[in-house]
């Protein structure tokens, strides 16, 4: 169909953009059935942090209603459902379905293998608060194979059964502490641990994909029909709308105050991040407009999702979001390791400032959550030494909240850039008028799904009862967490498969600009803005 004769509904059943919407909304609708007491998504496999190998240690069904399902059956169900849906999409997009099916199967298995390996305890697990705060009693080698606060409660509960009540200020001896750790289900002693959180899985997925794409090029060509990073990440963005809607359900009290401050801080920071980075790319690195725009969005908004959304809106070369995505993932690991300790050293008495700055600086959801969890532990340990006991998870919430507000810019900014590129950047000399329909055809359609999911759950939060919100949360949490993360993992493997290093000319400039912008512009401005809007805010205090 020619560009001139395109209808408003052109591509609804044949384009990758629209199939991200359909794939996203189908699972969104399935998750929404939880408000009727039906769990249609709980079969989804979910990775676990593990130390001992075995299916029961690697995976579990995400839904409580499927608790008795064997992990291998859950994995098979996940494969079957997503294979069926993506093959229908591939057929509609006129891809070679046989090649897609074979390539998808290999990429799917590779993705999950990377995901499981990345969740091995030595890579992912974080230290318990006891090990961080009192290593002389508990040892400095105790790690959590679940969320840190859950592991802390398990150890404290075991101590109470052994006659030591932590809430009353009682302190165990080393022998009793050791017994409690042995009894805690999710506490493990490890000789070493990188404490990378879930971010290592992304690095591993990208690395494996790059090895295939650059050293096994014949195999990569075989997989190419199913290596569709833009389709997978766009679907993940639709699921992200659910996550943002869920945050709306929690916006009460301290969280509401945090949400408003985070919104204001994020808007101010973003209005500085993007134009400064774009200007630096054009002025000092002589980058083309498209390259500067894609990198500016990736480093300013929410990383990989924003880079790909921007590239789609301005019709940038496919290699640009690939290059930027690689930088985002690698630099996120450096931020995860460096920033938590640095922020505590800079302003130990401003935990919410530190959390908000973290959310505006770290550019992937996984790395932000992991860095926020480490910061939460370090800050609460500092507070405890001063006799102040901050509520667990509240500092992490400040990091996640600002990250959520940044995520919201994906759709808005993709639309704005589409208009700018249509009316100014790509407007031909002498062209008197650009059809309004061109904006519609340029607009990333997956953003419709993103906002639709967000507004549905926002409506439930505003109009629904507490019981309805609780019921909605069950299905929503499965779609926005393991399903969304799986699509991210598929994206990273696929990016690697289609990336040929010999064609990545100009990577040096982008890398240098990214490093300078991140540590010289983004991080300092984020901290200053976080200080302005969050200074003096404190986490809720709890009784130990």
Image (spheres, rainbow, N blue to C red):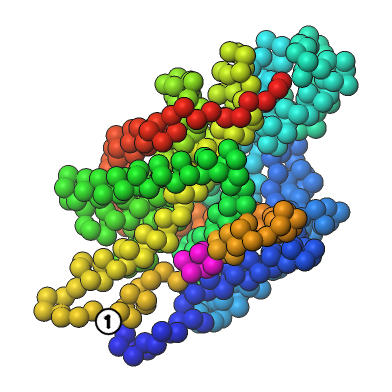
Q: Secondary structure at mark 1?
A: loop
Q: Residue at x 46, y 36 (%)?
A: 356
Q: Is residue 373 above or below residue 514?
A: above
Q: Is residue 360 left or right of residue 247?
A: left
Identify the residue under disc 1.
435
Q: Inspect this view and state whether residue 196 appears.
A: no
Q: Which residues are magenta?
A: 446-452
Q: Quadrant of residue 195?
A: top right
Q: Nearer the viewer, residue 295 or 537?
A: 537
What type of secondary structure mainly makes up the magenta span? helix
Q: Residue at x 56, y 76 (%)?
A: 89
Position of the N terminus, as image quadrant, is bottom left
- Near mark 1 (Cα within 10 A), the count class, few <14, some 14-19 or many ≥20, is few
Q: Position of residue 149 (x, y in %)?
A: 69, 32
Q: Quadrant of residue 155?
A: top right
Q: Position of residue 345 (x, y in %)?
A: 45, 19
Q: Residue furthest left?
A: 430
Q: Residue at x 69, y 15 (%)?
A: 139
Q: Nearer the viewer, residue 345 or 337?
A: 345
Q: Position of residue 347 (x, y in %)?
A: 44, 22
Q: Is residue 342 left or right of residue 208?
A: left
């Amino acid at each position: 169909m020619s560009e001139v004769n395109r209808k408003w509904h052109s591509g609804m059943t044949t384009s990758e953009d629209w199939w991200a919407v359909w794939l996203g909304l189908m699972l969104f609708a399935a998750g929404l059935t939880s408000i009727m007491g039906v769990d249609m998504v709980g079969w989804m496999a979910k990775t676990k942090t593990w130390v001992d190998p075995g299916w029961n240690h690697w995976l579990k069904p995400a839904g409580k209603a499927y608790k008795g399902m064997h992990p291998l059956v859950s994995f098979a169900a996940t494969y079957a459902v997503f294979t069926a849906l993506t093959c229908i999409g591939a057929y509609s997009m006129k891809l070679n379905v046989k090649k897609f099916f074979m390539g998808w199967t290999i990429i799917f298995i590779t993705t999950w293998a990377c995901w499981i390996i990345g969740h091995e305890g030595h890579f992912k697990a974080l230290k318990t608060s006891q090990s961080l705060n009192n290593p002389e009693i508990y040892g400095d080698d105790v790690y959590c194979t679940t969320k840190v606060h859950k592991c802390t409660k398990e150890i404290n509960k075991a101590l109470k059964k052994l006659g030591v009540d932590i809430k009353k200020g009682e302190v165990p001896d080393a022998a009793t502490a050791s017994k409690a750790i042995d009894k805690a289900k999710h506490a493990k002693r490890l000789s070493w641990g990188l404490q990378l959180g879930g971010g290592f899985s992304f690095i591993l997925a990208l690395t494996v994909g790059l090895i295939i794409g650059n050293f096994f090029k014949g195999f990569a060509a075989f997989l190419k029909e199913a290596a569709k990073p833009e389709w997978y990440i766009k679907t993940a963005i639709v699921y992200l709308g659910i996550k943002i809607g869920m945050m709306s359900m929690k916006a009460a009290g301290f969280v509401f105050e945090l949400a408003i401050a985070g919104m204001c801080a994020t808007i101010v920071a973003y209005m500085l991040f993007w134009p400064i980075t774009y200007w630096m790319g054009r002025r000092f690195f002589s980058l083309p407009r498209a390259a500067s725009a894609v990198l500016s969005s990736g480093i300013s908004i929410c990383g990989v999702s924003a880079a790909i959304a921007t590239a789609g809106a301005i019709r940038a070369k496919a290699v640009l979001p690939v290059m930027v995505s690689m930088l985002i993932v690698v630099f996120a690991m450096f931020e995860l390791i460096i920033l938590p300790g640095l922020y505590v050293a800079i302003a130990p008495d401003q935990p919410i400032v530190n959390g908000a700055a973290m959310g505006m600086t770290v550019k992937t959801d996984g790395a932000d959550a992991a860095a926020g969890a480490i910061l939460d532990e370090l800050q609460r340990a500092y507070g405890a030494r001063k006799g102040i006991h901050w509520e667990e998870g509240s500092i992490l919430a400040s990091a996640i909240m600002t990250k959520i507000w940044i995520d919201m810019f994906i759709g808005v900014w993709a639309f704005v850039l589409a208009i700018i590129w249509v009316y100014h950047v790509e407007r031909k000399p002498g062209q008197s008028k650009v059809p309004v329909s061109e904006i519609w055809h340029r607009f990333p359609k997956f953003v419709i799904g993103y906002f639709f999911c967000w507004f549905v759950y926002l409506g439930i939060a505003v109009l629904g009862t507490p019981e309805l919100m609780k019921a909605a949360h069950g299905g929503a949490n499965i779609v926005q967490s393991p399903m969304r993360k799986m699509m991210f993992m598929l994206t990273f493997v696929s990016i690697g498969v289609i990336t040929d290093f010999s064609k990545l000319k100009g990577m040096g400039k982008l890398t240098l600009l990214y490093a300078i912008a991140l540590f010289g512009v983004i991080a300092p401005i984020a901290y200053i803005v976080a200080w302005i809007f969050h200074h003096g805010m404190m986490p809720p205090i709890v009784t130990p």
